[in-house]
Amino acid sequence: MTQPVLSVSNLTTSFLTNGGWKSVVRNVSFSIAPKETLAVVGESGSGKSVTALSIMGLTPPDRSRIGGSIKLESTELLKLSPARMRHIRGNEIAMIFQEPMTSLNPVLTIGSQISEALTLHRGISQREAESETVRLLERVRIPSARTRINEYPHGFSGGMRQRVMIAMALACRPKLLIADEPTTALDVTIQAQILDLIKTLQEEEGMAVLFITHDMGVVAEIADRTVVMYDGETVEAGATAEIFSDPKHAYTRSLLAAVPKLGSLHGIDQPTRFPTVDRITGVAKEPERRANTVNEEDRPVLEVKSLVARFDMPGGFLRGPSGRIHAVENVSFDVRPGETLALVGESGCGKTTTGRCIMRLTTAKSGSILLNQADLLALDGRALREKRKGIQMIFQDPYASLNPRMTAGEAIAEPMLVNKLADSAEAYAKVGELLKRVGLLPDMAGRYPYEFSGGQRQRICIARALAVEPRLIVADESVSALDVSVKAQVVNLMMELQERLKLSYLFISHDMGVVERISHRVAVMYLGEIVEIGPRAAIFNNPQHPYTRKLLSAVPVADPTQRQRKRSIANEEIVSPLRPLDYAPPKRRYRQISPGHLVMDSNLDRVDLMGSSNRGPFCK
Amino acid sequence: MLFNRVVDSAITIIMVVSLVFVAMRILPGDPAVAALGEYATPEQLAAFRARMGLDAPLWLQYLTFLRDIVTLNFGTSMITGESIAAMLLANLPYTVELTVAAMLVGMIIGVPMGVLSATRRGSAADYSARVIALAGFCVPDFFLGALILIIFGLKLDLFPVMGGGVGFADRMEHLVLPALTLGLVMAAFTSRLTRSALLEVLRRDYIRTARAKGVDEHWVIYKHALRNALIPVVTGFGIYILTMLSGSIAIELIFARPGVGSVLINGINSRDYPMVQAGLLVFALFVVLVNIAMDLIYVLIDPRLRRVSK
């Protein structure tokens, strides 16, 4: 057997906290062979990122302790002097990170940031480094590399910045690339491109890859072998195919059960809860079949007709707007009682703006929004507040959407008090009931948000939304920030509440796997318009619009046996809905495929009218 | 961008001088009495007012005042009859050299002290830097000025302590102690600002990226972190210039230096309206110009502010 590129044995990393040394990684061992991809998978707090930082020697020196052994080929990294370790970093082991938006220095050109690694480790001249930088940027498929090396990071979209990070990491032809959640912050089509790029470059360079992720779909797509971590320890390790087909450990089974698998609801009409597996015993519980919550005869709770929202781009002092963002363009749909309509699409497609227009948090330019037949856009002041109670919103980030100085109980009681639905005593009596309803305990009402986990906080947000007994809940990426298993629990809770209270959801999401589980109907948005809308099964099994197909094919499938054939390493960007001021949106026609399944009847290939597609404010 | 700034600044200056115009007329005390003394006859006072335009209605006085500003006609002192423009012009260089020198001292001492403090966080060096900075904040500038004057000027007799000096070398020598006084106070401010900005920047993701590249810690701080950290520090300078100017008035008095500050104080004491108005106009212009300069420095530091013309 050849010598592994990296062998980690009994790695134990501890951090100094207020209460003394606390180990966050314990006795972790694995090795990576040349050209191999090893995935380390786990949820937040599992110690996967700390493992990576320990290998790089990037844990804070005065507040961390690393024990065990980390060998790069035959060199023991833990015994190296800081200066020797610096020579390894960026040269023999390179790393890319999760947040491409913040991982590049905003005041240095991308060229100088890439060539820095070259001049540092390879001792070549500035001029040589520059031409090598251009070559690297071309390798990661950045168009017009020669001119772009003098640009600063803010001119690049998220996907492009991650390419720059990869170019930087590859600069010195490292033996090992550590990728820490490199695609988590990216849109799904961009994620597919970056994963393909990493795979291709790995083959070309023959390097080993340590891939850290929480996404089982990505693991199935990319990894030869997988290490599953839980609470700082390895719970299972082995060939990826084996882990997926025959998971041994209860935790792995519970994790896999919670992973949304595209196509798993084939032939099932109703939305279906995630199966649950007990984390300790490994006992699986199949979800019960759900009763139909929608009555076709009911009048819709929400009817959105020809909604338009546009924003002007400021042009500068004493000058008019320089362009206009067509964020939402002629969007119409309705939601019936007990129904979940999913609004899907990528960054900048207008799905969030649509949700905000319905809440009247953003001013719509035209159109109408009927909530129980009353037009919200025509109301103002007191009448609006009265009506708007019927819709509540749950946001993406449960950490940011609860006031840290208010207890859970105060947060949940507030909407009842503000809307004068109850006096203080009644409201607090109801808080306990609401907490129970979302699966928490009534005596948690006195606790502050920091005492809760992310999933619990999202439950509190749901309880807060339920407090005013809304008919419709707008859930804007409400489960996107949660760990897989927690995400499955919260989605299950939302479905259970729907059954019990006949709630309607407008479920705004980019996560096709979750959308397949939760929704009755799906609307696909692209550049501010709905390009396809229909029953869930029709959209997932018979997608008609090229964009819907592209979106679905980009979703990583959590099944290593169905590893997708390699797509072309396209470097298309997500186009921006920024248009010149005199732009008139074309008239659209929709074609009916089957009852309720409509697809936009027009050419998808739209010219980028401003010639600056990748710098639109809507692009990541 | 510069054009916007100039328009903004012009509006700011007009507002400042209008406020001065109103304030001077609300304050108790009659300029005619101040100029001619308590024993002047009513006729003399009336003649004085007519000569100075003080008997005109307030709105007319205001319009004349605005016209004079736009045409840069500062008029003559009500008391001495000297040309105000000439007086200011003679005194301005002393104020400019004092503030510029003090800013240099403040930066040269403050920034490295802040860097040291941030990078050796929790060490003895950090602790002493923070104590010194706190002391600098607490000690009033006039007290520090007096202390420096006594120690370095009178006891050690190293530098002159009176006046502004004549000729370049002499002026520089006269500048040392006043600039040191103002500069030390500013260094305290700068070091605290630099420390917190740098600590903040060192937590950023791109610093981790630089370290992951194998960049030497020294370079991580000076090439990757400090430039980002200077952005809030420069903002701080723009605000600090106000403190600096008011400080310069006290320092000019202590070291008996000429300068716009002493002109202003004399003007206020003798209710010399045109003098005070002109002096404050110069101060306002100074603050505005420094802030425009800071904006230009921002653009140099932060490429995100360079508007790409499309």
Image (cartoon, rainbow, N blue to C red):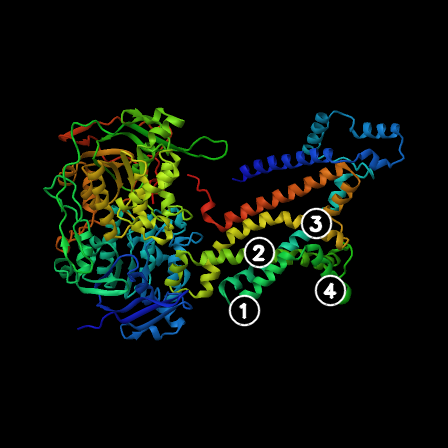
Q: Which of marks 3 and 2 is nearer the N terminus?
A: 3
Query: According to the image, label 2 marks what residue?
Result: B190
Amino acid at pointer 4: Phe
- Marks 2 and 1 sit apart, C-alpha to C-alpha, by 19 Å
- Looking at the rendered structure, whether the residues under marks 1 and 4 are on a common chain is answered as yes
Amino acid type at circle 3 is Thr
Task: Name the mark on residue B124.
Answer: 1
Q: Which chain carries label 3?
A: B
Q: Residues within 10 Å of mark 4 (few under 14, many from 20)?
A: some
Residue B222 x, y percent position in the rendering: 48, 61
Nearest to viewer (mark 4 / mark 3) = 4
- Residue A62: image tag: none
- Mark 1 on the same chain as mark 3: yes
Please tell me the numbered disc located at residue B95. Answer: 3
Tell me the distance, in whole angstroms, between the alpha carbons under discs 3 and 2. 21 Å
Q: Distance between the residues labelled 2 and 4?
A: 24 Å
Q: Residues within 10 Å of mark 3 (few under 14, many from 20)?
A: many
Where is the C terminus of chain A found, in terms of image quarters? Answer: top left
Kindly check if marks 1 and 3 are in contact, taking CB atoms under 8 A apart as contact.
no
Which residue is nearer to you in this view: A327 or A148? A327
Q: Residue furthest front?
A: A425
Residue B212 location in percent, x, y?
37, 62
Residue A549 in the image: above or below residue B208 = above
Q: Earlier in the sequence, mark 1 or mark 3?
A: 3
Kind of residue sitting beneath label 1: Ala
**Residues flagged by tags 3 and 2 on a common chain:** yes
Q: Mark 4 points at which residue?
A: B152
Type of amino acid at the residue the image marks with label 2: Thr
Q: What element carries label 3?
A: helix
